[in-house]
Image (cartoon, rainbow, N blue to C red):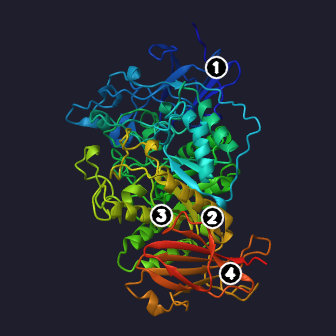
Amino acid sequence: MTLTIERGRHDRIGATFDGDGVNFALFSEHATAVELCLFSPDGMRETHRLRLPERTGWVWHGRVPGLCPGQQYGYRVHGPYAPEDGHRFNPNKLLIDPYAKRITGHPRWSDALFGYNPGSKTLDLTFSTRDSARFMPKCVVEDPSFYWGNDRPPVVPANESVIYEAHVKGLTHLANVPNAGKFLGLASDRMLDHLTTLGITAVELLPVQSFLNDRWLIEKKLTNYWGYQTLNFFAPEPRYLTNGQINEFQHMVARLHSAGIEVILDVVYNHTCEGSELGPTLSFRGIDNRSYYRLAPYPRHYINDTGCGNTLNLDHPMVLRMVMDSLRYWVEVMRVDGFRFDLASTLARDEGGFQPNAAFFAAIRQDPVLNRVKLIAEPWDIGPGGYQLGAFPHPFHEWNDKFRDGVRRFWRRDHRPAPELAARITGSAIQFDHSGRSATASINFISAHDGFNLMDLVSYSQKNNLANGENNRDGHGANQSDNMGVEGPTDDEDILTARARRRRNMMATLLLSQGTPMILAGDEIGNTQNGNNNAYCQDNPIGWVNWDETDDAFLAFVTRLIAFRKAHPILRQRLFLHSRERTVDGLEDLFWRRADGSPMRQADWDNEGLKLLCAEMRMASNTPAYAQREEAVFLIFNAGGPVNVTLPQPQPGHAWRLWIDTDAPDDEPWDVDGRQLAVPEACVLALVQEAEDV
């Protein structure tokens, strides 16, 4: 078959089907030539090699008439191979199109994937002439159009959100659903029923953009399970597709939307899977290394603020454009509802350090597509000044590790934990109450994919990561965990009872706190990872949610907690509580009380043995008149022994009703007779001031 290539267009980067042909456009500032390689339907045979005939600015482009969706392709890019100057062009390496909408699979590891000769003494300064095409997956031309019917994104307000962090395969593989482990499995009736019954409003998926299985993991018979090694920012991860069709992802989104559930993607725009100068040449490195990556003063080496070998260069306008185009693609074409940005501090760092108004943030905030979706930052990395909790601009939300650690320490009865807990359950105002930000900016969590899950948090005092093959050196060492008397599994009923109670206490603390709660998938059913707090490489029962051992009682309790949160706007306010007097009734919006009912004094806060917090909350002092209102909520967090608590005097015609009691999680709500309440040891209680029956 003879093919011709025409001028084409430069303004639509990627491979674009236009009805009777495909336009190809690739950015490379420093290349001298770009070759388009076309492959047979099985991807095994290179059938054509066509040089892109035009360069407009930094974009190489050409159009091939007659090509259709399904055509497999890749690129070979010519230019200088001069690592000491930051250039690593090697046309012997087949390269993935950064804008490819589908990829056929994963690279098969071979020394041919490297731009240099791995066995040489000078390593990356050498030049490899081995052809990598047969070891590389191929890009596929796609027409991403999809019939969405009457799909409507749920657009859940932040103060009504309950986020559920999940791994596509880990959540569904053992769930006894059709297409388990795939996007379609997550779209199954059973998964939707579980999420809607639980009360989830958004699923936050661990990386689903195509990613690499690291060579060193494959050699240890492990795999990149979590997916934080991105190969391409547009193509869905092939392992989650059943028939290789991207419309399976779109179908999943439509199904979740139909259940009122948003889809948030965990995205990794801080680095790529190509690693350091000793990594493979798969895409960006071979297309234009000096443009795509931030290089060290000696440009043979990379700036490594991520700990993964390289850092994406968002200072370059075309790299920033690629990231923005990727984000818009996932919103406009795949219809996701938001993003969680991995190691987000990296995205805002220039030569002067972290910049709250960095170009990346400015680009998103002015973008009419992206400024209307949920944006969540992981506010740290390992680079200079990397910890930036609270420093991100509106409309970003942020993972709040201080909430995680403060709650864990309080229930473990660490030194002086009560003042810390008080700050966390009221929205972490010291971090977030500035620049017009709201209390919902804090993403509160007890556990996440990285670290102990909730069951292991009360079952292990030490991490158990030997299965990762790193002699237990990996993973967090400071987990604020407590095995309650026995390390790991036990048949001791007293220990099991104590563990169950502490899980209830921590989950109740999460769902009764100001901010936006996030629950780790499986925590609601008592899932365990056997003490592994870094299961990034465990695509096996360690990393999967085990539905066969569901803790039905705990699941029912978590469901009840979420429903209680949704029913009481005092618990999910946008405005911060600062003990300020309200004009509506002259009462303060927040009282901290002692067990005897009197206000907390500084001496009480300074008491190192303080294990009891009692908070009387109302709608914030400057809440507008049109907002939802209710009288008051009284929360008791008791990490100590049994104690009698004097409740505040209710408003005339009202009484306190006890709704949540982690000591008696199955009890129905009941009205407190009088103002004295016997509070059991180690428990959380939530009471609501309600009108008395007439």
State which mark lies toward you, 4 or 2: 4
Measuring from the top left, give residue 534's x and y in whole percent. 35, 50
**What amino acid type should be assigned to the residue bearing mark 3?**
Arg
Q: Which residue is mark 2?
A: 564
Identified at 42% across, 88% down, the residue is 606
Q: Secondary structure at mark 3?
A: helix
Pointer 4 and pointer 1: residues touching (CB < 8 Å)? Answer: no
Report the disc number at residue 655: 4
Q: Which residue is mark 1?
A: 6
Identified at 68% across, 64% down, the residue is 567
Alpha carbon separation for disc pair 3 and 2: 14 Å
Q: Earlier in the sequence, mark 4 or mark 1?
A: 1
Q: Earlier in the sequence, mark 4 or mark 2?
A: 2
Q: Which residue is mark 3?
A: 504
Identified at 38% across, 42% down, the residue is 86
Q: Earlier in the sequence, mark 3 or mark 2?
A: 3
**What amino acid type should be assigned to the residue bearing mark 2?**
Phe
Residue 417 visible in the shown view? yes
Crowd band around label 4 with a 10 angstrom C-alpha radius: few (<14), some (14–19), many (20+): many
Residue toward you, 548 or 241: 548
Report the disc number at residue 378: none
* Image quadrant where one finds the C terminus: bottom right
Crowd band around label 3 with a 10 angstrom C-alpha radius: few (<14), some (14–19), many (20+): many
Q: In this rendering, would 457 be left or right of 202?
A: left
